[in-house]
Image: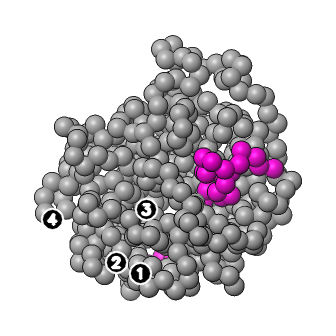
Amino acid sequence: MAVLSLLLLTGCGKDAATESAGSESTSSETVTSEAVTEKPSSEADPAGDTSSGTTESTEQSGMLPSVNIPEMKMEASAVPDTEAFRFVRDMKIGVSLGNTFDAYNDTSLKDEMDAEITWCGIKTTEQMIKDFHAAGFETIRIPVSWHNHIVDDNCTISEQWMDRVNTVVDWAVKDGMYVILNIHHDNHEEAKGFYPDRAHQAQSEKYVRRIWEQIAERYKDYDDHLIFESLNEPRLVGHKYEWWFPAGDPDVAESVQCINELNQLFVNTVRASGGNNATRYLMCPGYDAAPDGALHPDYKLPEEPKGYTGTVSHIMVSVHAYTPYSFALDLNGTSYFSIDRANGTGDIDSFMSKLYQKFIVKGVPVVIGEFGAVDKNKNLQERVDFAAYYVAKARSYGMTALWWDNNAFTGNGESLGLYYRRGGYFIYEDIVKALMLNCN
């Protein structure tokens, strides 16, 4: 096999990453992925209304073209008939609440609680959560950065920050949604959180253990609607192979082993906390959370600890895949996608097929915690087609997927927003319709 340039399809930093020089192109049978990061979104109303809160659709106001919503007919692959896969099926389709609790600014905030609005411009409300659910999203991922809310050397989380996150979790749980809670932007060295190499092993283990001890204690009586995700896109931040790696690189090989150990520590910590955490569903990524990170030969899914009382393991693989990258996330890439052309759909087919063969047929569920496609000069039909195809393909393999909604609609950054939070309505209703029509 040719050396893979791991151009990872992620979406969780601050500046758009560029394809690494000298990376090798791959055939349609090779999953290419690229890491990208979010920026604070513009607060100008993308529909031109900054005050009225109108619910008039952008199609009606003439800003977006009318589109066709394709209904994809895909043959379902065989999926194990276990409670774990029934659980993933019930998660249906989801959304990640991006640029919200994951935002961080380590030096300039006078009030730590302002972090919530630093990137998205507005605090989350219960109505926002209800609107996502009413639109058909059954799962919401709440990414949280914790390192800038630590109050002592023992990694104690600020009580007011923990309470605020808890408030939003409770809104979603009360409304009947599945909720994914994680450790997010705590991976850079300056955060003094986790950094997956041997030089930072002791620090990383202390951080991961202490954060999950506190989260697990807070939520141990919550039912299975609450899911924990160990780490967001664990990687060697700042390394030349942060976002892609050639086979056999020793630094990345070491990092993969460290990630395996941190994932196992996470599982052990949560399980030991008791209550419903003893069998709670847990998600664990590989390097970068990319498909190729999970497909890496050295990636090892954690084991349930001795004494686990579940009938099957409740540990799931977590991946992020903005695929095909050139269309989905590369701001300088193509705006074209067609469900009838393999140069777009082939990359989606390839990475999902590989995950299916490695994990799903062996009884391990897979959750795609982030995907999406940025707006490129209102290429709405292409984005609708992409959403329909992507979700239908994922569901045919027994996976669920969550769109990264960062409340960004304008400017030159990653415009992945669907729901305009200040106005209280969906700008891209047609994308939402495509997701819902094809997620069964």
Q: CA distance from mark 2 to mark 4?
A: 21 Å
- Secondary structure found at label 1: helix
Which image quarter is the N terminus in? bottom right
User: Quick check: is 324 in the magenta stretch?
Assistant: yes
Image x and y of residue 119, in percent? 39, 39
Q: Residues within 10 Å of mark 1 (few under 14, many from 20)?
A: some
Q: CA distance from mark 2 to mark 3?
A: 16 Å
Instruction: Give yes or no for contact between labels 4 and 3 (Cβ–Cβ under 8 Å).
Output: no
Pointer 3 residue: 232
Q: Residue at x 81, y 50 (%)?
A: 338
What's the amino acid at mark 3?
Asn
Q: Residue at x 44, y 70 (%)?
A: 240
Q: Which mark is residue 251?
A: 1
Image x and y of residue 17, in percent? 50, 56
Pointer 2 residue: 197
Q: CA distance from mark 4 to mark 3?
A: 22 Å
Q: Residue at x 55, y 79 (%)?
A: 246
What's the amino acid at mark 2?
Asp
- Secondary structure found at label 2: loop
Which corner quadrant of the image does residue 375 belong to? top right
Pointer 4 residue: 154
Looking at the image, tell me whether mark 2 or mark 4 is earlier in sequence order: 4
Q: Which mark is residue 293?
A: none
Q: CA distance from mark 4 to mark 1?
A: 29 Å
Instruction: Give yes or no for contact between labels 2 and 4 (Cβ–Cβ under 8 Å).
Output: no
Q: Which region of the structure is painted magenta?
A: 309-338
Image x and y of residue 2, in percent? 68, 82
What's the amino acid at mark 1?
Asp
Image x and y of residue 292, in percent? 59, 73
